């Protein structure tokens, strides 16, 4: 059944939009009469929608339609299924809504079975600017169980083999790197390849589901104890990285004492202060976080993180805990005070303050001593809940009054008049899309670029998950596609603020809408900018149903 209905009040809707057109045109004329300082030396004439498009406009318009993968005829069917994809996968994309729990975790043993056909390399690595499956199919592919240590592997790739875990493959590049650089030959003899398992876990930081390969529960060389809690990080994150180093008695190697490990994904490991090794590629010299001195400011960042934690904790209502922390801090920081004590005698804790109903162990605070400062990773892991709160606050910016935010942006647009005038030629007659985009104020384009990019990334993640299930090519989006949408929105706002300017895109839209021979281009432009929900092809399909 067609989406169009004769009873749909389309005419009324158009009438509502157009009934104040004359009043708007009067406002435009009034605005033009008042804007004298902006138009000095220029002959401003309000654009006639019936004027012909000149050659420059036509040429530039063609560039907008070039390489637009989203609205090509071959891809137009994706519009029909887009809403369905979003709702089908809405729950899958929100792994981090549920709190971390050990009950979500289990492991499967990789059976010993020879396979004629193996999958592409399932190891997660930093490829093309992001953490993703290696996917190498060429060259020698070995069974994943031949690896040693702990590796994060692609969860979807594991699911695709339907329990046939011996079919999982690893490329020769990761296999050789593992053998030559990550693990010593004598350590590999301690665990037989028959003990390979797939661990189904959740990252303790982002709470997302992750999948790991290891022999038994973890790697003897690269497993750690943080306050007697086992921490598991992929071994590739521990190659020439100082984030994980012995800091007695707080942080020590676990060796064979591995039980109920708390896992951390590659992405969160870097957010916590670690670094996954980037392979340089053939013929290039490798670099590490040590050679790049990426840990040189860890001490400063650690102090800043602890300071932010104290500020956050000071705003809680747990007065007893705050008193104990204050006493401990004064005891530790007194030697750095303006009036330090003459003797080395420590300030003792106030015995009269009860320690009931509190999670703070006073004895551990007063007696625990460190031989060296802990790394930034160790500090953040100790206060992992506060770290997750910081990430959550960044993702969910606290804005108490969205109307006030709108007023601030509106006022900033209004005050950008002089900046807009200096770029008038690029706004009225641009030669390229990028020139037109750059002519708008940075704060405005950056604001909408962030919104559109975030929405596209979320939608693309869901759509590609479904594409993988259907074994179809993954969808992509380009920066240019996003720029076209942002350009339309900013063009509208600047046109509202300064109607006397001949902003290019609104004028072209006005012209296209009045010319029957250009209605196809008009509709295509609306689809490119996502003003209309689907293409002409899909509209014809709806009309025939």
Image (cartoon, rainbow, N blue to C red):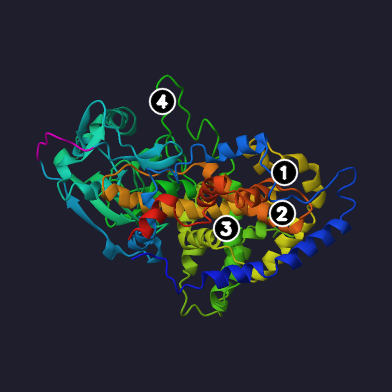
Label located before the other in sequence (2 or 4)? 4
- Secondary structure predominantly adopted by residues drawn in magenta: loop
Which residue is disc 1 drawn over?
427
Q: Mark 2 sits on what residue?
A: 494
Asked whether residue 114 is drawn in magenta, I would say: yes
> For the point 72% across and 61% down, which residue is it?
410
For residue 536, the mark is: none
Q: Is residue 150 left or right of residue 244?
A: left
Instruction: Answer whether labels 3 and 4 touch (C-beta < 8 Å).
Output: no
**Tag 1 or tag 2, which sits nearer the N-term?**
1
Of tags 1 and 4, the one toward the viewer is 1
Residue 290, above or below 282 = below
Would you call the spot at circle 4 few (<14 residues within 10 Å), some (14-19), or many (20 or more)?
Answer: few
Looking at the rendered image, the disc whose residue lies closer to the viewer, 2 or 4, is 2
Choose mark 2 or mark 3, whichever is in front.
2
Foreground disc of the pair 3, 4: 4
At a point 42% along the width and 70% down the height, the residue shown is: 5
The residue under label 4 is 281
Q: Position of residue 488 (x, y in %)?
A: 61, 51
Helix, strand or loop at mark 3: helix
The answer for how far apart the CA atoms under marks 1 and 4 are is: 43 Å
In the rendered structure, the answer to whether residue 524 lies left or right of residue 542 reads: right
Q: Secondary structure at mark 2?
A: helix
User: Is 82 within the magenta?
Assistant: no
Image quarter where the C terminus lies is: bottom left
Question: In the rendered structure, which segment of residues is drawn in magenta?
Answer: 113-119
Q: Identify the mark nearer the N-term, 3 or 4.
A: 4
The residue under label 3 is 306
Categorize mark 1 by other alpha carbons within 10 Å: few (<14), some (14-19), many (20+). Answer: many
CA gap between label 2 and label 3 equals 44 Å
Residues at marks 2 and 1 touching, judged by CB atoms closer than 8 Å:
yes
Hey, which residue is sitting farthest top in the picture? 283
């Amino acid at each position: 059944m067609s989406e169009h209905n004769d009873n749909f009040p389309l005419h009324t809707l158009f009438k509502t939009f157009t009934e104040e057109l004359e009043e708007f045109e009067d406002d435009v004329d009034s605005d033009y009469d008042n804007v004298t300082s902006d138009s000095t030396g220029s002959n401003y004439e309000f654009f006639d929608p019936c004027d012909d498009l000149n050659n420059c406009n036509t040429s530039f318009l063609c560039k907008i339609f070039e390489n637009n993968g989203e609205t090509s005829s071959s891809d137009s069917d994706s519009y029909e299924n887009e809403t369905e994809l979003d709702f089908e996968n809405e729950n899958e994309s929100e792994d981090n809504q549920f709190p971390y729990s050990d009950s979500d975790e289990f492991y499967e043993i990789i059976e010993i079975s020879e396979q004629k056909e193996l999958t592409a390399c399932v190891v997660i690595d930093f490829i093309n600017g992001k953490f993703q499956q290696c996917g190498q199919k060429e060259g020698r592919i070995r069974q994943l169980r031949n690896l040693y240590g702990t590796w994060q592997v692609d969860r979807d790739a594991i699911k695709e083999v339907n329990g046939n875990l011996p079919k999982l493959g690893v490329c020769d590049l990761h296999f050789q790197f593992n053998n030559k650089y990550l693990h010593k030959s004598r350590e590999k003899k301690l665990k037989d390849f028959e003990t390979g398992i797939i661990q189904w876990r959740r990252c303790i930081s982002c709470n997302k589901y992750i999948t790991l390969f290891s022999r038994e529960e973890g790697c003897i060389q690269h497993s750690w104890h943080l306050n007697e809690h086992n921490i598991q990080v992929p071994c590739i994150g521990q190659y020439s990285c100082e984030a994980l180093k012995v800091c007695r008695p707080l942080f020590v190697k676990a060796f064979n004492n591995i039980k109920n490990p708390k896992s951390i994904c590659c992405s969160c490991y870097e957010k916590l202060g670690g670094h996954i090794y980037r392979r340089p590629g053939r013929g290039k010299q490798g670099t590490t976080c040590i050679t790049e001195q990426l840990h040189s400011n860890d001490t400063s960042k650690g102090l800043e993180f602890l300071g932010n934690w104290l500020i956050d904790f000071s705003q809680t209502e747990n007065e007893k805990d705050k008193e104990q922390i204050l006493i401990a801090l004064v005891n530790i920081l007194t030697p750095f005070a303006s009036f330090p004590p003459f003797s080395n005698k420590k300030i003792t804790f106030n015995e009269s303050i009860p320690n009931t109903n509190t999670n703070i162990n006073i004895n551990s605070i007063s007696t625990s001593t460190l031989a060296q400062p802990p790394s930034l990773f160790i500090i953040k892991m100790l206060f992992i809940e506060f770290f997750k709160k910081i990430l959550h606050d960044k993702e969910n910016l606290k804005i108490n009054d969205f109307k006030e935010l709108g007023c601030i942006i509106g006022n900033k647009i209004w005050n950008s008049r002089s900046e807009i005038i200096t770029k008038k030629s690029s706004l009225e007659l641009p030669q390229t899309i990028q020139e037109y985009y750059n002519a708008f104020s940075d704060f405005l384009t950056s604001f909408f670029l962030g919104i559109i990019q975030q929405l596209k990334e979320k939608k693309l993640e869901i759509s590609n998950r479904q594409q993988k299930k259907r074994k179809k090519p993954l969808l992509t989006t380009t920066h240019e596609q996003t720029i076209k949408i942002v350009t339309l929105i900013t063009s509208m706002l600047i046109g509202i603020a300064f109607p006397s300017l001949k902003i290019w895109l609104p004028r072209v839209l006005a012209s296209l809408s009045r010319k029957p021979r250009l209605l196809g281009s008009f509709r295509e432009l609306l689809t490119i900018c996502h003003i209309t929900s689907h293409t002409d092809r899909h509209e014809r399909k709806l009309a025939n149903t």
